[in-house]
Image (cartoon, rainbow, N blue to C red):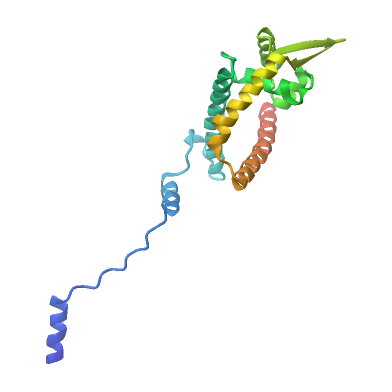
């Protein structure tokens, strides 16, 4: 009888045992969970493939980073003293300056993977008008090289890049390795996009 009374007392008056507390998730685990619940971060949900949603995420990142890069090179070159240039103008000037070698129009287009040669040709004429690029004719072949003025602007661009971009990056060996791997992957995917473009053109 005493035991039964004791059991009833415990059921009525004793506090219930607290439920097991779930282990708190790490910020990374919460981020992964939220990402899984919200789906991939893309700009064209109708293109997401069940076989590779990651490809759509990559393409969105490529669009955003590409536009940011173009904005950066224009502002950096403007700070270096050359204003009102397009991103292609800036990139052509850098490549013409590359390794201090004269370059043909076809070579510039090939290295930069630009299909429309007239766009690069227009950029070269614009840069010639600014006095930062000069053309040289040898027989039927025309080559282009940076002038002293062009090289001075490129050097100023480099200084600004070091202070505004590289200093902000604060890259260590591990990050530099990741960036190098990303560059390799971008080159691989560039080839895949080119092949896919040829396949689409043949349809």
User: Percent position (x, y) of residue 69?
Assistant: 56, 28
User: Percent position (x, y) of residue 181?
Assistant: 65, 43
93 on left or right of 29 = right
Q: 165 or 141: nearer the eye?
A: 165
Q: 130 or 92: nearer the eye?
A: 130
Tell me, yes or no, if residue 109 can be seen here: no
Question: Which residue is farthest top?
Answer: 129
Q: 118 or 89: nearer the eye?
A: 89
Residue under the point 55% across and 40% down: 170
Question: Which residue is farthest bottom?
Answer: 1
Count of labels shown? 0
Q: Is residue 183 above or below residue 13?
A: above
Q: 192 or 35: nearer the eye?
A: 35
150 on left or right of 168 = right
Q: Is residue 102 above or below residue 177?
A: above
106 on left or right of 51 = right
User: Percent position (x, y) of residue 74?
Assistant: 57, 20
Residue 91, quarter of the rendered image: top right
Tell me, yes or no, if residue 45 can be seen here: yes
46 on left or right of 81 = left
Residue 176, quarter of the rendered image: top right
User: Percent position (x, y) of residue 178?
Assistant: 61, 44
Which quadrant does the C terminus fall into?
Answer: top right
Q: Is residue 103 above or below residue 25?
A: above
Q: Is residue 46 above or below residue 122?
A: below
Residue 81, quarter of the rendered image: top right
Residue under the point 60% across and 15% down: 82
Residue under the point 54% across and 27% down: 67
Which quadrant does the N terminus fall into?
Answer: bottom left
């Amino acid at each position: 009888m005493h035991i039964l009374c004791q059991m009833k007392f415990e059921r009525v008056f004793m506090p219930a045992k607290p439920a097991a507390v779930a282990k708190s998730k790490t910020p990374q685990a919460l981020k992964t969970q939220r990402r899984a619940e919200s789906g991939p971060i893309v700009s064209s949900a109708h293109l997401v493939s069940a076989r590779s949603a990651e490809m759509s995420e990559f393409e969105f990142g490529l669009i955003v980073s590409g536009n940011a890069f173009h904005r950066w090179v224009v502002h950096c070159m403007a700070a270096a003293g050359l204003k009102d240039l397009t991103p292609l103008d800036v990139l052509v000037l850098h490549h013409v300056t590359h390794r201090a070698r004269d370059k043909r129009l076809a070579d510039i287009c090939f290295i930069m993977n630009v299909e429309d040669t007239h766009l690069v040709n227009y950029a070269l004429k614009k840069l010639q008008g600014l006095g930062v690029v000069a053309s040289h004719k040898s027989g039927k072949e025309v080559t282009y090289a940076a002038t002293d003025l062009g090289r001075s602007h490129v050097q100023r661009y480099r200084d600004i890049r070091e202070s505004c971009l590289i200093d902000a990056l604060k890259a260590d060996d591990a990050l530099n390795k990741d960036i190098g791997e990303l560059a390799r992957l971008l080159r691989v995917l560039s080839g895949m996009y080119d092949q896919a473009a040829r396949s689409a053109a043949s349809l």
